[in-house]
Image (cartoon, grey):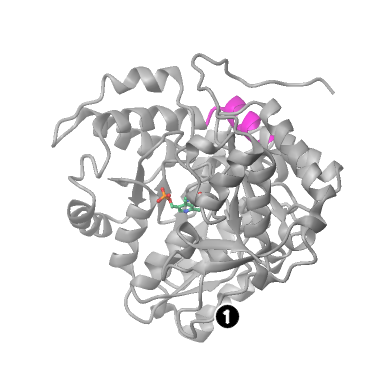
Amino acid sequence: VRRTAEPYKIKSVETLAMLSYDERKEALIKAGYNTFLIDSADVYIDLLTDSGTTAMSDAQWGALMTGDEAYAGSKSWKKLEETVREVYGYRYVLPTHQGRGAENILSQLKIKDGDFIPGNMYFTTTRAHQEMNGAKFVDVIIDEAHDPNVNHPFKGNIDLTKLQKVIDDVGAENIPYVCLAVTVNLAGGQPVSMENMKDVYSLCKSNGIDVFLDATRCVENAYFIKEREDGFADKKIAAILKEMLSYSDGCTMSGKKDCLVNIGGFLAMNDEELYIRSRELVVVYEGMPSYGGMAGRDMEAMAIGIREAVDDHYIEHRIQQVRHLGDQLIDAGIPIVLPIGGHAVFLDARKFLPHLKQEDFPAQALAAALYLDSGVRSMERGIISAGRNIETGENNTPKLELVRLTIPRRVYTNNHMNVVVDSIIDLFNKRDEICGLQMDYEPPTLRFFNARFSPL
Ligand code: F0G
């Protein structure tokens, strides 16, 4: 095979911190063994998240200067609005400061107390907004998604039988919308097939239920459809994306991922009445409907990023870089979630550290050990992230106990990925030495951000 390379060249560089083992140890203790609490100045390769960590292009940086900072009627907003309409295909768009701003508004307007929101696995902020507005989230993803070892091309798919059962059990009138994430972050960046999106939409429409997408990583989802689903190999990513979004009534979007910017988001929909009501709430929570928490220059950058993201060369390299990391780990016998997803490689901490019980927080412990070994920062996505049951107060115990190695877009080279591989292989060889953690401080909501730990 002939090797390929980045479809861009580097114009500006940022020097990385390279701490000694002792300095890293000190930083880890100061952070209470929680990678969220480590100062970025102490991190060598930062794989905490792909959110807002994108490198912007020269075109985006150039456009910052042309941002229209008017309080009302900004030209930059018009440009962003038009771009979303054209690339995503929705009729109405409202700007928000990031994805969760859109989630807040959608949840407030659509959900009444006692409602149910079926979805393909959950995302932390999305579910928090649904619950804060009185809904119960019901997971209707296919069973395969909960098993890190099952290799399924579209592990993010909704199980239509499960969805039908929720509808039968609680009644369509108590389901304001189905929340369909493309791709599914916590399942490992797993995609949803076009066929499944179509089927979900038609089942929902025949029951009078709306479908709202979490479109955060929708371009990555489109790439998997092109690669894996019959009939899409010769289509442009932009066309696949537009078809995907046509099987929905609207979306919430975190621009910090597939819009290739550091901040921003939007809420989009086709229903005019919902748009008018949403516009009222944007003013209350985000800002005028012509900026919604973003500066004019941010909106310029996002309008350009939206188009750059649907470039076929960009997205192919993006997915291939994630695989460059993941394939090497597979070859070395490291347990990871299969297949490799769109934005991250997920280590299976249960299998990596079989000597630890889930109550000893294996994923949190592995993330801490990786930082200590090489200054690579990752994120726990397991029992800590899953929080507690809102009714019983018990720990949710997700089947997936994972460490996420999330790849920022256009930021690191494949050499950085190789450094990560070497560190993980070394850790795997001495995995018996990694001990569990105890939680010394537990915040009441979204505990993973601020919890503190110490070694058992
Ligand atoms: N939906 C998904 C699937 C996400 O991954 C995120 C953010 C959001 C919604 C919320 O968007 O951050 O712009 O408010 N995910 C980040 C992550 C935080 O690291 O996975 P936001």
Looking at the image, residue 37 lies above or below residue 170: above
* Residue 340 is inside the magenta segment: no
* Residue drawn at point x = 37 percent, y = 46 percent: 90
Left or right, 95 with respect to 375, comes to left
Which residue does the numbered mark 1 point to in the structure image? 165
Q: Is residue 174 above or below residue 433?
A: below
Q: Is residue 278 above or below residue 90?
A: below
Q: Which amino acid does label 1 sit on?
A: Lys
In magenta, the rendered stretch is 310-320
Quadrant where the image shows the C terminus? bottom right
- Left or right: 353 in relation to 252: right
Q: In which quarter of the image is residue 413?
A: top right
Q: Does the magenta stretch include residue 314?
A: yes
Badge 1: few (under 14), some or many (20 or more) residues near its Cα, within 10 Å? few
- Residue 165 left/right relative to 176: right
* Residue 377 seen in the current view: no
Residue 59, can we see it? Answer: yes
Along the line of sight, the residue nearer the viewer: 86 or 53? 53
Callout 1 secondary element? helix
Q: Which residue is drawn at 67% across and 63% down?
A: 401
Q: Where is residue 380 in the image (x, y as percent from the top left)?
A: 60, 56
In the rendered image, which quarter contains the N terminus? top right
Task: Name the residue at 13% across, 36% down.
Answer: 71
- Does 8 appear above or below 393? above
Residue 292: x, y in percent? Answer: 24, 44
- Residue 27, position as x, y percentages in the image: 54, 45
For the residue pair 431 and 321, the one nearer the viewer reads as 431
